[in-house]
Image (tube, rainbow, N blue to C red):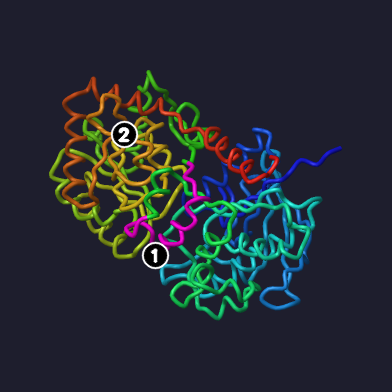
Amino acid sequence: MSIKPLVLFMTSEMYPFSKTGGLADVLGALPLTLHRMGVNTAVVTPMYGRFATSGFNLRLLTERCPVGYPWAPITAEIYQADYYGMPVYFVGRGEYFDRRFLYNTHAGDYFDNCERFNFFCRATLEWARRLDWAPAVIHAHDWQSALVPAYLHFWRRTDPYWKDTKTVLTIHNLAFQGRFASRLFFDSGLPAEAWNMNGAEFFGDFNLLKTGIAYADAVTTVSPTYAEEILTPEFGCGLEGLLRRRRGVLRGILNGADYSVWDPRDDKFLPCIYRSGSPEGKLDCKRALLKEMCLPDQLEDKPVLSFIGRFRGQKGVDLLVSIIPRLMEMEIGLIVLGEGKLEHEAKLQELAEEHHDRLCVIVGYSEDLAHRIQAGSDIFLMPSRYEPCGLTQMYALRFGTPPVATAVGGLRDTIVPYPHPQATGFTFAEPDPESFYQTICEAVDLWKNKKAYWRGMVERAMSQDFSWEKSAARYIELYQSLGARV
């Protein structure tokens, strides 16, 4: 019996087991979609201390997988879960992953992040040696997995086990690069020839993401527009030169939305379900949300706006904070969910106390509450300064909550802006407070005064299809273009 080639995904987080953002959603959906399309897939991810099994049974495969990094006797524990028929492997070692947070605390990044994720990369490759056959493709994601393409680039020269394994590196956010002291390169196990300006070295530091970009067989980003943007100094984060040199292997493949999780027609987190063409249930969700947020019933007849995201500069939360006093002069409600920089958290909570009858701020993240906010609000705010793809705007569209968003990255690829006849939302060109405020005013005016047009926009938004099958087909084409018979 022939053995089907394997596509092995590497990720630092995967929903429903671990999550800080969209990366987890992508890795919870893309490999499984490919699996259901007939591709043999598996995922490897760390086993963190605050780990959610989410009802999936884990079994220990080995307590002593040899890694040899950062010292010879070190080993990893390998666990496995059956994720709807697809194997997910978990790399465990207490001193690296048994922590409250995945990457950092409010005080900053963990001091040993380089060692932690170098260990993860090395452990994954050692575990792959124990599989029945070498993977046809190892698909790494972001800086935490980016050393794998570099290892295999050099190992293929002398180790026949890896001679046919191709590597793909997906950049979910170029701003996070994994930049560390140069001494850590010389402990990494990479050959000295990788230490150069076109390889691992970056202004005297060891840059993990740059290393992966330099040596991967293919590099992808999560939207076509972002793939073009990162070739420019404005969005290239210092790597635009290398990316332009590697443009021939760079592709932008739009992320998908997991409609098995994010769909108001069948959502376990909602008080009632609804669908395009008959969205009456959305009003019931709005009533329930106002009650849950302790906001007055009078807002039922007013537009309710929402923001869900990290409180940091990329997401434009400072733009939102700066215009909230002006928004509170309008007849609207506003619900904010997220966490991040302490100064943003404090300022938002201060504003919520001042405007408690129309502004509700929840610091933290709750998956079920995010669903109810999407369903119960009328307009979704996404003032990102850059957005590689963005998933929450896709969720907002499906939930019939037209977004107001900056025209960057994946937001440009997914939102048809008003006043286009087929508009599904609103965009503004410059990420500044005035542009953001004026576009919100435009959306609120449309909601209040052009009900028939608004209903049409909601129905068009809900009918948009960003299913993962479309994106998965593009990845299959990419793997095959590398010579992998998947």
What residue is at 57 percent from the left and 37 percent from the top? 472
Residue beneath disc 2: 402
Numbered mark located on residue 254 in the image: none
Select label 2 or label 1 by which is in front.
1
Instruction: Specify few, some or many for label 1: CA neighbours under 10 Å numbering under 14, 14-19, or 20 or more.
Output: some
**At which x and y percent is residue 128?**
74, 56
Above or below, 352 against 473 in this view is below
What residue is at 62 percent from the left and 78 percent from the top? 187
Above or below, 196 against 429 in this view is below
Q: Which residues are magenta?
A: 232-253
Amino acid at circle 1? Gly
| Nearer to me, 144 or 253 | 253
| Nearer to me, 95 or 149 | 149
Q: Secondary structure at mark 2?
A: loop
Q: Quadrant of the N terminus?
A: top right
Numbered mark located on residue 238 in the image: 1
**At which x and y percent is residue 346?**
29, 62
Amino acid at circle 2? Pro
